[in-house]
C-alpha cells in the first residue's frame, strides 16, 4: 500500500468515525424553545432597558446641568439644589408605547423522526400512557431494559443481554452497549455486539438506531429517517475479510421483508457491499437491520439498525369489475366486494365456460362441451350472443390461450389421446383476420406450457411458463416462426432459488408479470428491461393459478388453485383478499 | 413586534431547523460533552439572533454560528481543563472504548473508538481543523473563517494533525 493509499484510507477512516460518532449524538428536543425563551427574556430586558436608558440620559443631563449651574451659581442659592434632591427618586414605569413582552413561547417536543421502537407515533405513546402502560411495561421507562428488549424482540437475536458499562444518559438521549460471552474452546470472551441509541419522548424511551460497537458493520444506505420504498437499497463499506451480513426490514409488527433473507458477502478489498430487500410494511416506520454472525460460534457478532420511514405511495385504483365464472357461465363480479353482478353467457347443461379473458369490449373464454371438446369463444361485455373464435386442432383440446387484440390468438393445445408420433402439445399462433397459423410442437411432456400463453407487446412473440420436470422458466417464442419447443429464449431470468414460476402475463405496457410459488407462499414479480422487481407476496402454501393484470399495470388479481383471489394495486403495501362467493381459479380484469 | 424582529425570529427558526443538530454534533465532537455542546450552540443562536440586523443572510448567519460554536467550544474546553486540574483524578472517560469488539478483523485494531481517542489527544487547533474538515466538510477558506486563522495555518494544522493521528494509531495497533 502506497503512502497516498494510506492517507486516503486514514482520511476515510477519520471521516466515517466522525460521522458515526455524530450519528449517536441526538440533541434534546427542547433546543428551540430554550433559545426562544432566552431571546424573549433578552427582548424583555431590552424593553425595560430603553426607557431606563432614556431616563438615565435625562438624569445625566440634569445632573450635569445642575452641576454646571451649581458651579456657576453663587453659594447664596444652595436651596435649589437641596430641594431638587429631596424625597426618593421617582420609580420608572414602563412606557405604555413599549410593547409588553409576551410569555416565552414553548415549542412542544416533537416525536423523534427516526424513532421506531416500541412506538412509531406520538399517539401510540400517549395511548400507552393512558392505558397505564408505565406500570404494565416498566421496561419502556428504562433505557437499558428497553435496549435489551429491542435486541431480543425486534432484532430477534437472543443472548445479547450483557451490558457493557452502564447506560450513557445525556439529557433525553441514551446509548446502551450490549454484548454477550463468546465461548471459544475453553475461553469465555466478553464481546460487544451493538450500541443501541435511544431518545426519551414524554415518558417512554424510544429506540432510534443501533450501531456495531466495533465500528465495522456500517450502513451508508439507507440514512436514518429516510423514506423507503420497496425494494430497499441497502449498502455499506466493505471493511474486513470474508464477512457476511444478513439484511432485513423489520417493523414492530414483525418482518416486513417479502422474500427470503439472503446473506451478503463483503470484505476482501471490495470497497462497498450492497443488496436490495423487497418489503411490504403495514407500519409507518421500521428499521433496516443488518446482523453479522460470528464465525466462532454462529451467534450474533455485530448488529446495526437504521430507523426508516416507509414512503406512502398513493395507491393506484383498480377496475370496478372483474370477470370470472359462476355455474359454468362467464360472470361479471364487483372487484371490491367479490359479489356477482351479472351473467354474460347463458347456462350450458353438460358444459360451460372457463378461463375468461377481457380484450377490449369482449370477454374471450374457453367453452367446453363434453369430454375433450372445447372452443375459444367470445361474448360482448355489454351483453349479446357468444361467437366461436377458434377451434382446436382435431384430437386436441385448448388448455390455455392468450389474445393480442381481438384477432390474434395463441393457444396451447393438449392431445386428448396422443397417438404414436403425434405431438403431446401444440403451441398454436393464429391470425384470425388473415387466416394464417403457425404451430410449435411439443413432442412429449415435459417440457410443457403451463398456464395461459401471453403476447409480448410486439405482437409477434409469445411469453409462456414452460415446465421442465421439477423446474420451470419463463420463455419467449417467435410465435409465427419458432420451430421447436426448445427454441424459446428466456423472457425473464428468475433464479430457481426464488421458487417455481406458474403463471405469466404481459400487460399493456409490455411488462411481464410472473406469479411464483415460493417456499412460503406466492410471490408476484415484474420483469421489465431485464430487471426483476417484486410486486407483492401472499404467504401460505397455495399454488398460483391465474394472474390478471390491468392494461396499465396498476392493478393485479391473483388466484390460487383453490379459487381464492387477492387484489393488489401499484404503490400499495397491502394485498387484499377478495371475498368471492364461489371459487375463482381463473379470472380477468 | 416590528418587521425586523419578526424577520429575526423567522430566520432563527429556519436556521435552527436546518442546522441545529449538525452544530450540536460539531460542538460535541470538539467538547466530548453533549449537554455542554447544546449550551454552546444555544448561546450561539441567541447571539446570532441579536446580530441578525447586521447579518440578514442565512449563509452569513451560518458562518457566524460556526465561528461562534468553535470559539465558544474552545472557551468551554479551557474552562473544563481548569476544573479538571482541580478535580480528583478519574479513570479516562474513553476507557470503555477499549473493550474488545465481537470479531478481530483487519480493521478491529484501528476501529472507530481508537480513531476518536487518538483525535481527542491531538492539540486543540489540529483537532478543530480535522473535525471541521472531515465532519463538517468545510473548505480550507471556510475553516479559516470559522477558526479566525489564515488558510496557510489551516493547511499546516491539517497536515500536522493527520501525521500525529497516524502516529498515534500506529502506536496503538
Image (cartoon, rainbow, N blue to C red):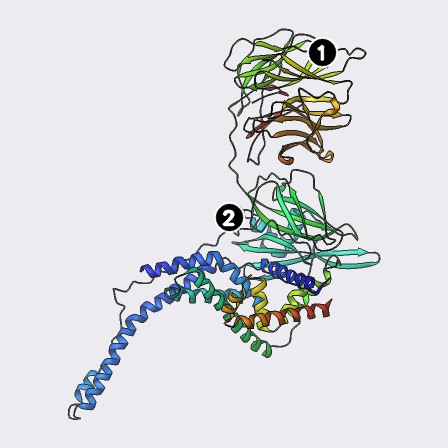
- The mark total stands at 2
Residue that numbered label 2 is attached to = A122
Q: Residues within 10 Å of mark 1 (few under 14, many from 20)?
A: many
Element under label 1? strand
Chain under numbered label 1 = A
Residues at marks 1 and 2 touching, judged by CB atoms closer than 8 Å = no
Element under label 2? helix
- The image shows residue A379 at horizontal and vertical percentages of 55, 12
Q: Is residue A24 left or right of residue B107?
A: left
Q: Quadrant of residue A78?
A: bottom left
- The image shows residue A130 at horizontal and vertical percentages of 51, 47
Q: Earlier in the sequence, mark 1 or mark 2?
A: 2
Q: Is residue A124 above or below residue A201?
A: above
Q: Nearer the viewer, residue A167 or B48?
A: B48
Q: For marks 1 and 2, give the CA distance.
A: 65 Å
Residue A11 at least partly seen: yes
Q: Is residue A528 above or below residue A463?
A: below
Residue A165 at least partly seen: no
- The residue drawn where x is 64% and y is 60% is A12
Q: Quadrant of residue A162?
A: bottom right
Q: Is residue B90 above or below residue A353?
A: below
Residue that numbered label 1 is attached to = A396
Q: Nearer the viewer, residue A226 or A202?
A: A226
Q: Residues within 10 Å of mark 2 (few under 14, many from 20)?
A: some
- The image shows residue A488 at horizontal and vertical percentages of 71, 26
Chain under numbered label 2 = A
- The image shows residue B23 at horizontal and vertical percentages of 51, 62
Q: Quadrant of residue A261?
A: top right
- The residue drawn where x is 56% and y is 55% is A199
Q: Is residue A222 above or below residue A359?
A: below
Q: Nearer the viewer, residue A97 or A518?
A: A518
Q: Are the residues under badges 1 and 2 in a single subunit?
A: yes
Amino acid at each position: 500500500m502506497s503512502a497516498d493509499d494510506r492517507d486516503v484510507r486514514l482520511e476515510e477512516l477519520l471521516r466515517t468515525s466522525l460521522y458515526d460518532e455524530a450519528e449517536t449524538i441526538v440533541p434534546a428536543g427542547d433546543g428551540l424553545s430554550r433559545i426562544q425563551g432566552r431571546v424573549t427574556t433578552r427582548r424583555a430586558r431590552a424593553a425595560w432597558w430603553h426607557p431606563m436608558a432614556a431616563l438615565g440620559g435625562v438624569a445625566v443631563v440634569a445632573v450635569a446641568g445642575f452641576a454646571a449651574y451649581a458651579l456657576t451659581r453663587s453659594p447664596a442659592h444652595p436651596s435649589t439644589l437641596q430641594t431638587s434632591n429631596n424625597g426618593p427618586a421617582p420609580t420608572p414605569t414602563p412606557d405604555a408605547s413599549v410593547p409588553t413582552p409576551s410569555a416565552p413561547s414553548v415549542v412542544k417536543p416533537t416525536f423523534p423522526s427516526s424513532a421506531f421502537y416500541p412506538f412509531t407515533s406520538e399517539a401510540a405513546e400517549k395511548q400507552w400512557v393512558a392505558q397505564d402502560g408505565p406500570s404494565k411495561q416498566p421496561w419502556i421507562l428504562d433505557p437499558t431494559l428497553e435496549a435489551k428488549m429491542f435486541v431480543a424482540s425486534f432484532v430477534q437475536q437472543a443472548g445479547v443481554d450483557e451490558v457493557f458499562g452502564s447506560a450513557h444518559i445525556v439529557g433525553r438521549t441514551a446509548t446502551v452497549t450490549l454484548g454477550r460471552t463468546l465461548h471459544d474452546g475453553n475461553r469465555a470472551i466478553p464481546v460487544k455486539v451493538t450500541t443501541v441509541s435511544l431518545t426519551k419522548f414524554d415518558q417512554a424511551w424510544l429506540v432510534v438506531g443501533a450501531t456495531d460497537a466495533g465500528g465495522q458493520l456500517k450502513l451508508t444506505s439507507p440514512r436514518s429517517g429516510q423514506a423507503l420504498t420497496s425494494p430497499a437499497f441497502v449498502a455499506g463499506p466493505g471493511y474486513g475479510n470474508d464477512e457476511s451480513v444478513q439484511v432485513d426490514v423489520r417493523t414492530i409488527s414483525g418482518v416486513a421483508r417479502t422474500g427470503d433473507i439472503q446473506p451478503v458477502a463483503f470484505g476482501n478489498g471490495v470497497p462497498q457491499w450492497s443488496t436490495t430487500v423487497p418489503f411490504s410494511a403495514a407500519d409507518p416506520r421500521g428499521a433496516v437491520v443488518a446482523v453479522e454472525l460470528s464465525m466462532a460460534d454462529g451467534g450474533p457478532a455485530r448488529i446495526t439498525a437504521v430507523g426508516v420511514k416507509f414512503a406512502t405511495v398513493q395507491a393506484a385504483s383498480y377496475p370496478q369489475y372483474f370477470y370470472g365464472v359462476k355455474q359454468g357461465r362467464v360472470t361479471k363480479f364487483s372487484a371490491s366486494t367479490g359479489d356477482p353482478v351479472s351473467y354474460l353467457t347463458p347456462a350450458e347443461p353438460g358444459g360451460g365456460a372457463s378461463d375468461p379473458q377481457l380484450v377490449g369490449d369482449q370477454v374471450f373464454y374457453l367453452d367446453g362441451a363434453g369430454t375433450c371438446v372445447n372452443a375459444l369463444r367470445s361474448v360482448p361485455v355489454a351483453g349479446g350472443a357468444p361467437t366461436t373464435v377458434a377451434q382446436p386442432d382435431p384430437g386436441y383440446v385448448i388448455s390455455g390461450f392468450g389474445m393480442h387484440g381481438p384477432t390474434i390468438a395463441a393457444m396451447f393445445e393438449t392431445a386428448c389421446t396422443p397417438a404414436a408420433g403425434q405431438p403431446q402439445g401444440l403451441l398454436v399462433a393464429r391470425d384470425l383476420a388473415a387466416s394464417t397459423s403457425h404451430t410449435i410442437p411439443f413432442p412429449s411432456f415435459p417440457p410443457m406450457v403451463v398456464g395461459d400463453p401471453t403476447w409480448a407487446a410486439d405482437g409477434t412473440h409469445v411469453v409462456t411458463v414452460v415446465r421442465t420436470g421439477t423446474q420451470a422458466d419463463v420463455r419467449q417464442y417467435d410465435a409465427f416462426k419458432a420451430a421447436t419447443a426448445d427454441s424459446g429464449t428466456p423472457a425473464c431470468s428468475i433464479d430457481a432459488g426464488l421458487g417455481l414460476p406458474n403463471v405469466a402475463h404481459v400487460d399493456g405496457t409490455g411488462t411481464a408479470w410472473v406469479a411464483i410459488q415460493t417456499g412460503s407462499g406466492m410471490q408476484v414479480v415484474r420483469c421489465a428491461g431485464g430487471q426483476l422487481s417484486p410486486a407483492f407476496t401472499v404467504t401460505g402454501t397455495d399454488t398460483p393459478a391465474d394472474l390478471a393484470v390491468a392494461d396499465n399495470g396498476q392493478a393485479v388479481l391473483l388466484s390460487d388453485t383453490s379459487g381464492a383471489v387477492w387484489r393488489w394495486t401499484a404503490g400499495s403495501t397491502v394485498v387484499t383478499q377478495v371475498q368471492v362467493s364461489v371459487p375463482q381459479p381463473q379470472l380477468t380484469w | 413586534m416590528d418587521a425586523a424582529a419578526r424577520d429575526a425570529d423567522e430566520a432563527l427558526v429556519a436556521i435552527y431547523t436546518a442546522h441545529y443538530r449538525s452544530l450540536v454534533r460539531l460542538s460535541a465532537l470538539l467538547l466530548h460533552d453533549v449537554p455542554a455542546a447544546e449550551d454552546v450552540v444555544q448561546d450561539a443562536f441567541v447571539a446570532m439572533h441579536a446580530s441578525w440586523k447586521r447579518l440578514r443572510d442565512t449563509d452569513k448567519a451560518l458562518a457566524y454560528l460556526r465561528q461562534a460554536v468553535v470559539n465558544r467550544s474552545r472557551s468551554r474546553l479551557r474552562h473544563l481543563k481548569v476544573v479538571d486540574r482541580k478535580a480528583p483524578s478519574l479513570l479516562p472517560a474513553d476507557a470503555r472504548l477499549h473493550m474488545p469488539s465481537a470479531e478481530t478483523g483487519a480493521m478491529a485494531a484501528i476501529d472507530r473508538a481508537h480513531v476518536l481517542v487518538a483525535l481527542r489527544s491531538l492539540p486543540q487547533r489540529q483537532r478543530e481543523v480535522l473535525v471541521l474538515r472531515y465532519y463538517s466538510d468545510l473548505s480550507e477558506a471556510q475553516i479559516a473563517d470559522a477558526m479566525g486563522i489564515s488558510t496557510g495555518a489551516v493547511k499546516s494544522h491539517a497536515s500536522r494533525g493527520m501525521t500525529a493521528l497516524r502516529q498515534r494509531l500506529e502506536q496503538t495497533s
